[in-house]
Amino acid sequence: MQLPQYFLADLPDRAAVTPAVVTEACLSLKSNRRQFLRERNTDSMVAAIAAVAEDWLDPDNPFRRLALAEGPSALGFSRETLSAGLDAFFRTLTAENLRALLTQDLGNNQRLERLSPAEGETYPRQLAFAQGPPLVAHITAGRLPNPVLTSMVHGLLLRSAQFVKCATGTALLPRLFAHSLREVEAKLGACLEIAEWPGACHDLTDALIAQADCVTAMGSDETIAAIRRRVPWNTRFLGYGHRVSVGYVAVEAMSAFTLPKVVAACAQDVIAWDQLGCLSPHAIYVETGNRQTPHRFAELLAAELDRLEGICPRGRLSLDEAASIAARRGFYEIRAAHSGDTALWRSEGSTAWTVVYENDPRFHPSCLNRFVYVKAVAGVEQALEGLDSLRGQVSTVGLSASGLTEQRLAQRFAAWGVTRICPLGRMQEPPLTWRHDGRPSLADLVTWTDWEPGGRG
């Protein structure tokens, strides 16, 4: 399949992208939005997005086939990892889920069309109307496509034109998604632009920011701070910086019957997107007090990762990434040889996966790419003590517990500051209604008008 050159990222000569070209593209996007997007009703927009998502779940969809053919070399994920990740993402984009997101964030999914009360109010004292920004600039980071595609879906729901600036070498899946939208409805594609350039090209980024009504940015805390300084005070800015995630296994989930299922769920979280997302677990905290020990959990997890490597292999690494894993392994091999509180399991002849067991709750960031810690703890307070230096930076806890214990642990993690708690095995599959970093996805982007009708007492 040969993609037509609809977007800047389609151009073979990236040098053709200049500040003047970026400015002209933004002006065209704003004009197209006024003609094709601003007056779209919510139901038709939901139907269009859901139809595209359904197409992507079809193995014969040409855009999906191209993603799986070119994605491994372009993005560094194996074909199997890409396929599983795309399935997990596009399964969430149903009409029902899209409407649920609109209702959750806006109170009524008609508020993008007219002044409306909150859903369920019979005698409203206040009606509200929400408008998305005319032009949203998304400045992305990293190889994972899901955060970028999610941002694009949010912009479409709000009838905003969007310019997606991808990190160098990562535009493939946003491009394909944009082309698939254009295939279903050309007018939607006309309200999108996809481009990529290095972060050091400040003249291009400044040209984009100058035209945007809202800027979203992803990346390290340092990157977010640098972009924020370039955004005018009266332009809305939403930054998503560094976050980490962990798993937690309660002692009751460590029975001989349940343990294999818990280990299998944990392994799925580790292999999803090769553990590179902010929702991927760096460490799994496992409670002591059962005959099935945290050490045994680590041993079984290693065996499961080894099995899954034959089914869904990890993607290729750079020399620096491979060297980082080798160095980290060497450190723990020496420690394990001198202490019973540490153990290490590793893939033979490759850096495909690594499991480190420690009888120490202190958090150490993983070097990722399927390198995970298993840490023994007496209970949740000891785990939180080990995580204390990361308070405010823990995105997700994958939890394996049940009944009142699950409720108690979830409440404790929530009170401590974790913004998402989910079952172990679903860490990299957040629902569409997930509040990223504890903030509403759509409501953060819109501008509200409130009307208090007269004559109502």
Image (spheres, rainbow, N blue to C red):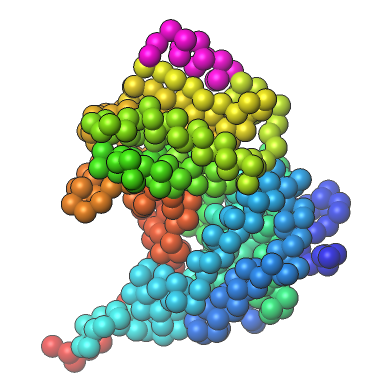
Q: Is residue 134 above or below residue 230?
A: below
Q: Residue furthest left?
A: 457
Q: Is residue 118 above or below residue 414?
A: below
Q: Is residue 356 visible?
A: yes
Q: Is residue 349 above or below residue 140?
A: above
Query: Which quadrant would residue 149 be assigned to in this image?
Result: bottom right
Residue at 13% across / 88% down in the picture? 457
Given residues 456 and 307, the one toward you in this image is 307
Query: Which quadrant would residue 367 be assigned to in this image?
Result: top right
Q: Residue 432: where, in percent of width, then height?
A: 45, 64
* Residue 335 is one of the magenta-drawn residues: yes
Given residues 188 and 237, the one toward you in this image is 188
Given residues 76 and 208, the one toward you in this image is 76
Left or right of 330? Residue 392 is left
| Secondary structure that dominates the magenta span | helix
* Residue 295 is one of the magenta-drawn residues: no
Range drawn in magenta: 327-340
Residue at 80% across / 59% down in the picture? 10
Left or right of 401? Residue 58 is right
Q: Residue furthest top?
A: 338
Q: Residue 95: where, in percent of width, then height?
A: 49, 77
